Amino acid sequence: MKHHLNTLFIFTQGAYLRKESETVVVRIDKESKTRLPLLNIGSIACFGRVGISPQLMGFCGQKGIAITFMTEHGRFLAAVHGFTPGNVLLRREQYRRADDQDSAKLIARACIIGKLANYRTVLRRGVRDQSASDATKRLTRTANRIDMAIRTLNDSLSLDQLRGMEGEFSAEYFGVFNDLITSGKGEFVFSGRTRRPPKDKVNAMLSFLYSMLTNDLRSACEAAGLDAAVGFLHRDRPGRPSLALDLMEEFRAVLVDRLVLSLINRGQVKANGFVEEPGNGIRMNEATRKTIVAAYQKRKQETVTHPFLNEKMTLGLVPHIQGRLLARHLRGDSDAYPPFAWK
């Protein structure tokens, strides 16, 4: 069983990372601040003006430790990784299936079913936490509509029809998302999904964590020998990790949405931890980003039972398992790709 390794997040502007023996040293203002064994690190995420020595980049590439560079606000810029050891026959089959609409829609349908099932779970859990009767009715109604939608996702639907249904019910889910916020109502208000830039505090957290989740799924695809750029649900676009986005759909509600709601409802994030920038929407200050990243890492360490394998594992390991299950299906070792449905 693969072990869940840690991600090293670097937020301090001007930080410089270098390799010393088998450790990574973080230097700030020419002074060593942190020293960590590389053996326990699965990836490094750099936000803003962060430098890395060529020796460390070479070592990470050789050992399969992914390095990701993002803006200070979490927008992806570039990734550094070594040779991908994927089986060429596996990737050829991936490309063949992606080019065949009948084959692609079966995998796309599984991803959408996983996404909607996890939306339904979040809404039903929200009903238990909600005391307002009107909000309870809205959440229950939307959860039931999503449940009915899952039952109608059959093989007769085209890929475009599947995409349309995914968009429709994502909009319904976010239409009642504000009802899931039970604390800090005056300070944290969600009126709809907004991106680039996020226009409120909730969207700022969602966008930031979705970027981190995308990087995790990109790594999971690469580790399984798959091409993260060629997907089945998301159309090909230069620079877009379409397969990572496909698999990510199952984890949006589980790893991000539920976490954002928990941080707000438990008062772990404060309204004064956000700054409005003219033309750039709402951004988080460094302290809030660190709080969110720490909570995200803690969330990934939680233990779940995989519904298909019936094995206990950390939640952060599940994306890697899903990548392997997809690879197994593409090789012909299983009849279908089983999505991850959280309970």
Image (cartoon, grey):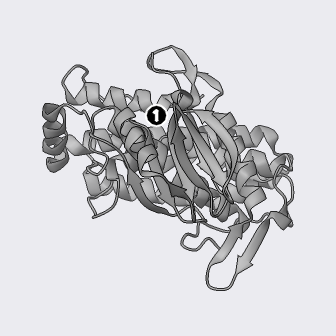
Q: Amino acid at mark 1?
A: Pro
Image quadrant in which you'd find residue 104: top left
Nearest to the observer: residue 322 or residue 16: 16
Residue, x 53% and y 58% (percent of image)? 51
In the picture, measured across the screen, residue 153 lies left or right of residue 318, that is left
In the picture, measured across the screen, residue 38 lies left or right of residue 108, that is right
| Label 1 CA crowd tier, 10 Å (few <14, some 14–19, many 20+) | many
Nearest to the observer: residue 161 or residue 21: 21
Image location (x, y in percent) of residue 200 = 70, 70
**230 relative to 111, above or below:** below
**312 relative to 261, above or below:** above
The image quadrant where one finds the N terminus is top left
Mark 1 secondary-structure assignment:
helix
Image quadrant in which you'd find residue 94: top left
Image quadrant in which you'd find residue 238: bottom left
Q: Which residue is mark 1?
A: 319
Nearest to the observer: residue 188 or residue 11: 11
In the picture, measured across the screen, residue 7 lies left or right of residue 139, that is left
Image location (x, y in percent) of residue 306 = 51, 21
Image location (x, y in percent) of residue 303 = 63, 22
Q: How many marks on residues? A: 1
**37 relative to 135, above or below:** above
Judge whether residue 342 can be spotted in this image.
no
Image location (x, y in percent) of residue 198 = 62, 70
**147 relative to 287, above or below:** above
Judge whether residue 315 can be spotted in this image.
yes
Nearest to the observer: residue 171 or residue 206: 206
